[in-house]
């Protein structure tokens, strides 16, 4: 007799904490593909370094729910050019493909204490913080935790963690440029 | 394959999240909005010339003009929202402190133009969109 109420309570509890979305568009390739079904945890991702690399959902200026990856964290200095520099250190991004088009290059972005910089993984086909600027934490409505469809790509969508390279030797390098490899 | 599609339809969420790109990315242009505003004006002219149709052909033309006007006005709103929301950035707001008001005015004028057949309403929309386009091009100067 108690099984049904318990099941209903469990569903309500889950729905209060998680929701599902279907992915449309290509800006998160090669991580997310159109037609993927995701489970998102409601609210902003955990604060601090744990948010780096999380895929978050928010509404844009036109009212669409969009998905992007957290690249810059509150308080950080960030440059987006050929590569992304965080506090002058190049960010290693195995999840990203392509390079930022010239029109979307951004100079130094000093993020405010509650601002995040979001970029799509498909760098050459994404409208994101390179266009609409950093977003406040209050705007982050969900964080992707699991892909449950299609079965072939089923699995957790955990943050890949953050790997930063060494500070380039030349502090005067132009926007986001990684120093060229020395030629033999 | 059919079974997979059925399972997918059962599991499909009722909400879509856009991993979007306003193609072509990083390339913005006010031309489509201006063309939309011009279409609204043209449809108002055609509706005026048609007068009060008395036959089915006339009614069909009127329906077509009205539908086209609605679509064009909505296109204006869509395109202006993209420029306003995605292209314009804080430094542009310093150049044009009334940017938000201009975008908002266009939304209102486009809404009015949808429900109106007055050429003056269409002209007001077109003038506002042209002004918005000028602001866009000044940021490129």
Image: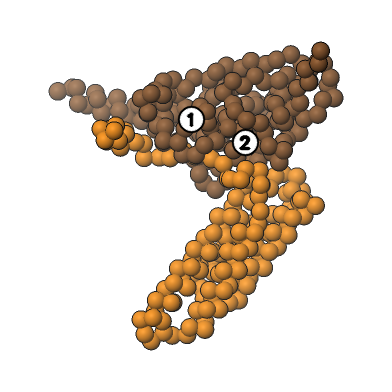
Q: Which numbered mark, 1 or 2, is in the foreground of this view?
A: 2
Give the residue at x 62% y 21%.
A93
Name the image quarter holding the C terminus of chain A.
top right
In the foreground, B103 or A16 = B103
Give the residue at x 44% y 20%.
A156
Q: Residue B101: where, in percent of width, then height?
A: 66, 57
Question: Could you tell whether A168 is left or right of B58 in the image?
Answer: right
Badge 1: chain ID: A
Query: Which mark is drawn over residue A129?
Result: none
The chain drawn orange is chain what? B
Q: Height in image: A31 above or below B135?
A: above
Q: How dense is the environment of label 2, judged by Cα within 10 Å: few (below 14), some, or many (20 and up)?
A: some
For chain A, give the colour: brown
Give the residue at x 73% y 49%.
B93
Give the residue at x 53% y 32%.
A28
Q: Residue A99: where, in percent of width, then height?
A: 66, 31
Question: Could you tell whether B119 is left or right of B138 in the image?
Answer: left
Local SS, label 1: loop
Count of numbered circles in the view: 2
Picture quadrant of residue B35: bottom right
Name the image quarter holding the N terminus of chain A.
top left
Tell me which numbered mark, 1 or 2, is placed earlier along the sequence. Answer: 1
In the foreground, B6 or A73 = B6
Is residue A48 among what the camera can see?
Answer: no
Q: Are marks 1 and 2 on the same chain?
A: yes
Residue farthest to the front, as pictured? A184
Badge 2: chain ID: A
Q: Residue A65: where, in percent of width, then height?
A: 49, 40
Residue that carries the numbered disc 2 in the rendered image: A124
In the foreground, A142 or B134 = B134
Query: Which mark is drawn over residue A32?
Result: 1
């Amino acid at each position: 007799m108690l099984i049904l109420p318990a099941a209903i309570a469990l569903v309500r509890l889950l729905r209060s904490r998680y929701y599902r979305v279907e992915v449309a568009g290509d800006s998160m390739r090669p991580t997310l593909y159109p037609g993927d079904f995701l489970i998102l945890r409601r609210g902003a991702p955990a604060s601090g370094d744990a948010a780096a690399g999380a895929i978050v959902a928010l509404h844009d200026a036109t009212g669409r729910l969009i998905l992007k990856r957290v690249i810059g964290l509150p308080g950080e200095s960030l440059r987006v050019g050929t590569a992304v520099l965080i506090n002058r250190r190049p960010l290693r991004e195995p999840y990203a493909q392509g390079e930022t088009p010239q029109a979307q290059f951004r100079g130094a972005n000093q993020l405010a204490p509650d601002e995040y910089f979001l970029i799509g993984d498909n760098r050459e086909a994404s409208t994101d913080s390179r266009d609409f600027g950093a977003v406040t934490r209050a705007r982050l409505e969900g964080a992707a935790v699991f892909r449950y469809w299609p079965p072939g790509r089923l699995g957790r969508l955990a943050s890949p963690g953050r790997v930063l390279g060494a500070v380039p030797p030349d502090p005067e390098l132009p926007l986001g440029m990684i120093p060229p490899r020395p030629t033999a | 394959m059919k079974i997979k599609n059925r399972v997918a339809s059962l599991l499909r969420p009722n909400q879509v999240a856009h991993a979007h790109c306003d193609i072509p990315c990083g390339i913005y242009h006010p031309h489509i909005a201006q063309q939309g505003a011009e279409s609204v004006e043209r449809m108002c002219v055609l509706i005026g010339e048609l007068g009060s149709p008395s036959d089915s052909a006339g009614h069909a033309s009127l329906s077509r003009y009205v539908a086209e006007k609605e679509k064009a006005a909505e296109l204006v709103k869509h395109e202006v929202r993209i420029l306003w929301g995605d292209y314009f950035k804080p430094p542009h707001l310093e150049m044009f402190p009334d940017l938000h008001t201009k975008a908002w005015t266009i939304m209102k004028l486009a809404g009015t133009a949808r429900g109106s057949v007055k050429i003056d309403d269409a002209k007001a929309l077109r003038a506002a969109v042209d002004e918005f386009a000028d602001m866009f091009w000044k940021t490129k100067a």
